[in-house]
Image: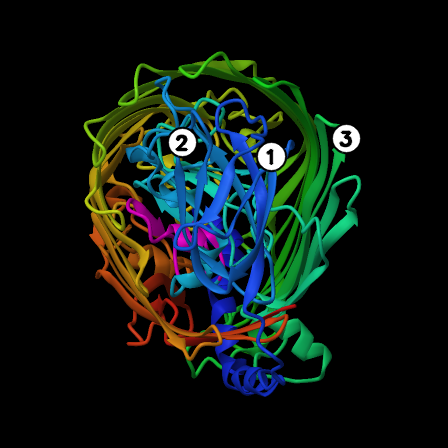
Amino acid sequence: MQQQQKHCCMTTQNTHNLSGIFRAFSQTLLIFFFSLSVIPAGAQSQTQTISGIITDEASKSPIAGATVSLLNQPTIGTVSEVDGRFRLNGVPIGRQSLRVSFLGYEQRIIPDIIVTAGKEVQLNLTLQENINELSEVNITYSRSKDKTVTNNEMAMVSARSFNVEETKKYAGALGDPSRMAANFAGVVSGNDSRNDIIVRGNSPTGMLWQLEGLNIPNPNHFGTLLSTGGPVSMLNNNNIDKSDFFTSAYPSQYGNALAGVFDIRLREGNLNKREFVAQVGFNGFELGAEGPISKTKKSSYLVNYRYSTLGVFQKLGLQFGTGTAVPIYQDVNYKFRTAVGKKGELTLFGIAGTSNVDLLGSDIDTNKSNLYGDPYSNFYARYATTITGLSYGYQLSEKTQLKLTLGYSTTYEQFKGDSISYENNEIVLPSDESKMQTSKASAVATLVHKFNRKNSLQAGLIYDHTSFDLFNKDILAGTIDRVWVDDKGNFGLAQAYAQWKHRFNNKLTAVAGLHGQFLTLNDKSAIEPRVNIRYAINSRHALAIGYGLNHQAQSIYTYFVQTPTSTGAVRTNKDLDFTRSNQFVLTYDWNATDHFRIKAEAYYQALSQVPVETRPTSFSVLNTGASFAPVDEDSLVNNGTGTNYGIELTLERFFHKGYYFLITGSVFDSKYKGSDGIERNTAFNTGYAANVLAGKEWNLGKKGNILSFNIKATSIGGRYFSPVDIAATQTSGQLKLDESRAFSEQQDPYFRVDIKLGYRREYKRSTLEFSLDLQNISNNKNVFSRSYDPRRQVVYYNYQQGFFPVPTLRYTF
């Protein structure tokens, strides 16, 4: 376990310290932002354009002839064309709501769309066919608000959509989908410095990330192969379209995950005019462009490039007292789309990013708080990730769509460390070294067919072929190399699924599906039934139940951990089976008014086939991700178990009459058993989590300028730690834990309050937005981790982020 803590230093305390680095330049950046904000105003443009496409929810076919109009000004309207596309001109700037209707379909209201002078609004909308053979009908319960309707029509429980406005609006979200999702019921952030999320007591490694239907690697800067998060997201919120987030019992198309699913969609570039965005803030300096490639062929492009803020300042020769500990990263997000004939569509999309940082112990003043790393070690970290996809969709008929997506992704992670003598600060010897590379070729085929207004089918095949080259070693006792992993090879994960949706009537809907997967690495397979049933009691109330069986393969690293023997290294983990999870969910939904929703969920999750050690110990793979360390344990077997259960409550007032609020709370219990058979708290069993978010907007005059105020308060139960073995720690000079009493010591509860102030100013053909995110305004000292100082021979606490101002400036034109 000590080797794990040593190896993961970059992904825990040192990445935590990356956020602390930003404090050093916040005041300078604020002055810089305010100086940029003085832009001459022109004559005020009063209108903008809303455009998009309308499709059938089940068949995905375009709907021609649908009526789109402003809810409060029905004279401003248009009709969708033969390809389902519409263009609504003359829309006044400010917040607007749309009404979308078509004969035989349920009417849909899209509320509170932000319309600005600097950018056209683009929407991808779906309509659901009415179950009865009537003329146009009013919207039913489940369609009443856009954000309660997911892109995935098969989702009935534990699902929510989100859009870019929510990642920008919520205090503390920093434009990051993961940090935004941490406000939802049952979701907890791993720590302040990273965006890993804990869903219903599960390890963050149980998350699945998808991009445009592809299973993708960790989409974060400084995000390791063995984690699902990092300090800064590579997903640029200027490019994200409405996307889905699932916390359990998810539809059958998602596999190889135990905790939750992020299904990210990228929006299309503007088909009619060129638009640009320039932004600078916590995530970096960035510039984006979009527009038509050919209007006649209905093709467009969307590209956004970003470079780290501190990296730019370093190149300008500006220093902020952080020594060499400057996080350098850059990324690009892109999407190109073109129509192919009358029924086809070709899309190229992707993300690519690099990141690196050097954390030198020699730069640390040991008389001050340890903000930038370990004073007795130097660490050098390099990361790179690429994700590329090419998809072709073809409308076989009005009721059938076929889509094929090919993908290729790579990850690169190199980490080196050396030890420094705490007597004279000289480098003593290398302490650890790792280099991990993967490449994955993917193919996804999806068929969607709508039989009639009551029945629809979705089926698909997914294949990911991964090549890897893994190496990780430590130097123990000064001279002995301990090689944990040294292997290269390839394997495949094949998945197939089918799911059927049947609408008995306007009130009762059921979705049943089957998912299967096969791992070629060790010939392990699994079949997973899934079922969801929803009953709308009336137009305001609904009940739903869901069940899902899920399996997840172990990490590539875990399979190839070496066991040293007299005849050579043996891979004793290679035959590990999938970890298994049975999930049960009960949901109650109440739309108390058109703008206020109450949702309650109760869930139970039973985990089995969990890898634990063959000898009796407290170790379990269910706790991985608590320190973002690789699992170096060998000789693992699938004999462990775990349980997660709890209740969740969400009270949400959608934005209306200038304000909104979101209150979420969960009470839960998360337990596991290792090979010693003792039931213990997991590392993620905080017991409860509560969030209160609220926001208010004020119109300044008649020109569309907006002043906004958002606040967030979070309270989470204390995390469980294993007690420190003081005697062993003092003897070894390194932090040692008493694993026989694993996770028996609870820290104080976590509490934090964030405030976000915003100002939006409209110009003739552009929009300027400025925000100031004041994080942890009370400067609460929330416990992050523990360390051992061999010079003073004391164990001390490291604390999470203190007060941290984050300014952001965004200009669209």
Q: CA distance from mark 1 to mark 3?
A: 15 Å
Residue sitting at x 70%, y 25%: 343
Image spot of residue 550 (x, y percent): 40, 23
Q: CA distance from mark 1 to mark 2?
A: 37 Å
Q: Earlier in the sequence, mark 1 or mark 2?
A: 1
Q: State left or right for residue 497 relative to residue 266.
A: left
Q: Earlier in the sequence, mark 1 or mark 3?
A: 1
Image spot of residue 223 (x, y percent): 56, 51
Which of the two marks, 1 or 3, is nearer to us in this view?
1
Instruction: Give the residue at the far front of this rendering.
Output: 75
Q: Quadrant of the C terminus?
A: bottom right
Residue sitting at x 60%, y 66%: 118
Which of the two marks, 1 or 2, is nearer to us in this view?
1
Scheme of image coloration: rainbow
| Label 3 sits on residue | 340
Residue sitting at x 52%, y 83%: 30
Task: Name the one closer to the observer, 644 or 119.
Answer: 119
Question: Looking at the picture, does residue 370 appear above or below residue 108?
Answer: below
Q: Look at the image and give the residue range highlighted in magenta.
A: 175-196
Q: State the SS at label 1.
A: loop
**Residue type beneath disc 3:** Val
Q: CA distance from mark 3 to mark 2?
A: 38 Å
Within 10 angstroms of label 1, few (less than 14), some, or many (20 or more) residues?
A: many
Image spot of residue 356 (x, y percent): 65, 61
**Residue type beneath disc 2:** Leu
| Label 2 sits on residue | 258
| Label 1 sits on residue | 84
**Residue type beneath disc 1:** Gly
Q: Earlier in the sequence, mark 3 or mark 2?
A: 2
